Image (spheres, rainbow, N blue to C red):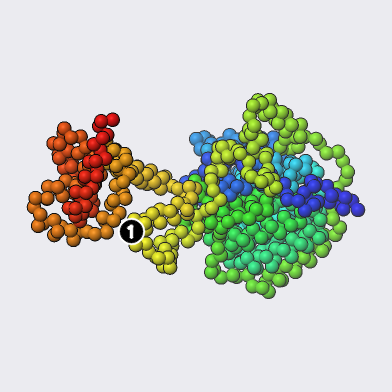
Amino acid sequence: MGDSNMAQLGSVALNGTSPKKVAYFYDSDIGNYAYVTGHPMKPHRIRLAHSLIMQYNLYQKMEIYRAKPATRGEMTQFHTDDYIDFLQKVTPDNMDGYMREQGKYNVGDDCPVFDGLFEFCGISAGGSMEGAARLNRQKCDIAVNWAGGLHHAKKCEASGFCYVNDIVLGILELLRFMKRVLYIDIDVHHGDGVEEAFYTTDRVMTVSFHKYGEYFPGTGELRDVGIGQGKHYSVNFPLRDGITDDSYKSIFEPVIENVMKYYQPEAVVLQCGGDSLSGDRLGCFNLSMDGHANCVNYVKSFGLPTLVLGGGGYTMRNVARTWAFETGVLVGQDMERSLPYNEYYEYYAPDFELNVRSSNMENSNSREYLEKITAAVVDNLRQTGPAPSVQMQDVPRKPFGGMTDEEEAELDDLDEDENKDTRMTEHRWDKHVQNDAEFEASDDEDMSRANGATRLKANKRTFTDFRKGETDVESDNATPRDGKSNDNGKEQADEDTHDVNDDTIEDIGAMQEADKEFARDEELPQPEKQQVDEDGDVGMTDSAPVEEAPIKKEEVEPETASEPRPAEKPVAEEPAGQEPPEPAAEKTPAPEPKPAEAEPEKPAEAPEAKADEAPVTEAMEVDEKDKTKDEKEPSPAR
């Protein structure tokens, strides 16, 4: 009865069918830290994942927080004081003076000393502790911290690229309110640091799926089930090389289902190490992005408060894609597989696709082996007995890490007081979650761009863009007769399919040069039109196109007809230099015949007019000139 009542605790989203409320923790400084040159661990991968999360507009579905870095006192809730003091003092400049301590705390090759080491650990641990605190206060249903998940760190030593175990610190915060916490690890390496921390207690069950056998860290055997009060509360599933999506699903879901059945946890911590993906630099599994994300989706389906963390992963482009996709799974957002343009777009060449495919490597995990291990794991779970509980006691109001409700309310009031005339401050923007019932997107695009969301359209570059030229050639569309119209059609198609989000710096420069050339071409015919207006009357230019239309039908033939009349050649040459209405307008002033004869020679630049007026007969020319003279003679008298 008590467990059923506790199951109702939590936010309304957990107990109903409404979407989960997700809190996302990210610190923009995390990508500035770097291990030594050539080291496989690269914190920059978290910045890549965050960029994709912003470009896919996933930020609209969750609250974004920049957690306060964990302090020395918060880290020492698990780690020893002297170890944390060492991490706080050592730098690359003075590390030679701490040679003895480096050996004592296992700081050296795998876990080197680099600039900002303590600050990096503080950001990682602060996000996990703040996420756990928000879950405790029922401020969210799912907390995400991709900078966390460093599961190898021990109580008084570094291990496996990990210095401070943020997972243990987060679980300790959850245990202040939760009776039982389940830890699930899908990293290719065994989560030895977390298992060791809770090896003797039944309040935390650790479940790890990992590669075992001549592989770091060498622990995680099937028979390692815990000791003392924690016996049978450590679950290890040793695997071999090359496990595929189907094989992983066939073991993960039955094991987690039985864990939920026998242990009945009140909160879940899920470590999503990306080194179990296919093609990882250090991993040896063959999971695709979909197979990896299936584990996240399955754990989410139980509707428990969940803390989702990062972990390993040493092929940056694959880790970023997978974590961004799993963020979409957590917020319930469908994501197109063609990647949107972002500042790290070139990292995802050549396919530019939101996908990590499995390879053709051999799967060394036979069905018989997996079934045998699954049966042994389920048998160990049956021996756990009833779900453990704890004695009722007062819970300290102040958490180990993170803010209290009062401190958060003070921040909200301070932001409101300092920005009275601002509709959307950065603090409010981070906490805003877009409602699916909104008819239009909110008008805070400027704030979105300031925080890295620069997409302007929903369309994205398709995977088959590089084949576009071939498809155009093979299309059944009729080719236009005029080459000019064909060019216009291409330009129109380019405008329809063009996405401003796909523009690189080179593309923008090329477009600007093309615009300048196009503007020059437009400027060339304008002076000709102005000269025509100055030389002739507006009324006469209106009739010019009407007379040109029938004349253009006959070309080349009339030149032979004009040869037998030499006396009329100068008359024919005059209009040949320009259109028929223009010479009539020039001859209207009677006292100045000489300029009228000189001006027709100026517009000799119009070759089309010569070809058009050559076929006109003498009778037509004389009649037209007489008519124009009769019409123009009274005009000067006015």
Viewed as shown, does residue 106 lie left or right of 557?
right
Picture mark count: 1
User: Residue 386, how many percent across, how many down?
Assistant: 86, 58
Q: Position of residue 583 (x, y in %)?
A: 21, 42
Q: Quadrant of residue 443?
A: top right
Provide the secondary structure element on which disc 1 rests: helix
Q: Is residue 98 left or right of residue 304?
A: left
Which residue corresponds to the image point at 25% horizontal and 38% vertical from the top-left?
Answer: 632
Query: Percent from the top left, x then y, of residue 591?
Result: 16, 32
Q: Which residue is mark 1?
A: 483
Amino acid on which the number 1 mark rests in the picture:
Gly
Q: Is residue 154 above or below residue 485?
A: above
Towards the viewer: 103 or 288: 288
Q: Is 404 positioned to the left or the right of 39 in the image?
A: right
Residue at 58 percent of width and 66 percent of height = 242
Give the camera-side residue of 33 and 67. 67
Q: Is 393 on the left or on the right of 45, as rendered?
A: right
Residue drawn at 29 percent across, 47 percent down: 544
Q: Nearer the viewer, residue 139 or 225?
A: 139
Query: Compared to 369, does 292 lie above or below?
Result: above
Is 315 drawn above or below residue 30 in the view shown? below
Camera sees residue 628: yes
Q: List x then y, in percent, for residue 276.
A: 60, 59
Task: Return the residue nearer the eye: 589 or 402.
Answer: 589
